[in-house]
Amino acid sequence: MLAAPQASCDPRFELAFYKKKKRFEAPVPAAPLADTHAHLMSFWGKEPAEVLARAALAGVRQMTAIYDPLADERDSQAHAMQLRGWLADARELLEEAGSLNAPAYPVADAHEADPALGRPAALLERVGYLAGVHPYGAPAYTDAVHAQVAAALDDPLCWGVGEIGLDYHFDAEDNIEAAPHDLQMEVMARQLELACARNVPVELHVRHEADDLARTSHVDAYRVLKDVGVPAAGCVLHCFGEDRATMERFCDLGCYIAFGGAATFKRNDEVREAFAACPIDRLLFETDCPYMAPEPLRGLECEPAMIGWTAAALACDRSSRTGENPDDIAYAVWRNATKLFGRHE
């Protein structure tokens, strides 16, 4: 177990969250943490630079953000400048707090991790992003939009393509109808081809209605992957919420499976079973922030500093089913993330 960081007197960097007047201290991570899916441009009540600083203090040492030229309403160059600005601001905040190089989380030598990862500053050198258009944007996906995705891949901070995929769910809250399935599959295939051609990883968003027992979106996504090919650099099923059989089918294609806060919800034992059965070299953690904060923070605006709850809950649950050491599980997931998103190495 890693040592806890020193508490900050600045409330912006307090590693605790409040829900219904209860205070929840962030768990001390057993290994460096990687958030493989974070929407930094989607917060409604948080400042991205402060979010990055808190994540660094909470033990996050790698972060993969998401850029969608349609949903984010900016071109790739503007997005790249904005992300670099947030990173610079986060560095200033940590310097102001005296925490930039404070030894917050010493790394255990037994797991052969870089000792430098114990310092919050390490995160700021390991933040990148993926570029892609969510399936909601399929009807507006033009050659010009495709060019924006391709242009983003020229940025050294752009690690791959995503999130792309298929969404057959009717979003009642925002009144968003699913685009025609064949159109979604065509747009997914086009972006997948780009990832294959550029030899970069891809992250997939795949969702259907809860009563779709055939899991049609996953059946169709599997078909697209078989037709186009899985990028040699890697493919991730992001925010996995399905059963063991679905996990195994995609792992057989060589995919990684990313589990977020929803996997900690009480009703999702089927998802935790899939996590426990997944090959350990295919596992990833994510937040999908600002959505789906893990238990016991469910209902709050999620942020990367909360990923420790997901990592601890899932590692312990898997350990109870398999007998593996929870720390070994945590380190394995960290190594998977650095292998997949490793342009910084």
Image: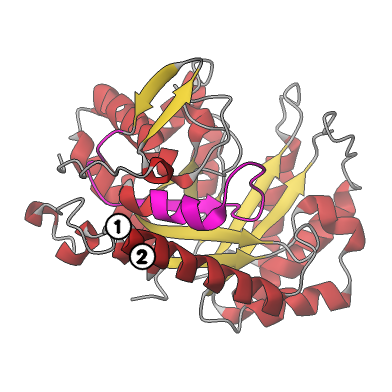
* Residue at (68% x, 66% y) in the render: 192
Residue drawn at point x = 40 percent, y = 40 percent = 11
Indicate the amino acid at tag 2: Lys
**Disc number placed over residue 339 in the picture, else none:** 2
Residue 271 image point, x, y percent: 50, 28
Residue 30's quadrant in the figure? top left
Start-end of magenta stretch: 27-54
Left or right for 253, reference 59: right
Q: Horizontal and vertical percent for residue 196?
A: 61, 74
From this viewpoint, is residue 286 visible? no
Tally of marks? 2
- The one of 258 and 306 positioned closer to us in this rendering: 306
Q: Are marks 2 and 1 in contact (CB under 8 Å)?
A: yes
Spot occupied by residue 47 in the image (x, y as percentages of width and height)? 57, 51
What x and y, as percent, mark residue 115?
A: 15, 63
The amino acid on which the numbered mark 1 sits, given as a three-letter code, is: Arg
Q: Nearer the viewer, residue 236 or 70?
A: 70
Q: How is the image coloured?
A: secondary structure
Give the residue at mark 1: 335
Q: Secondary structure at mark 1?
A: helix
Left/right placement of residue 9 relative to residue 173 reads: left
Q: Quadrant of the N terminus?
A: top left
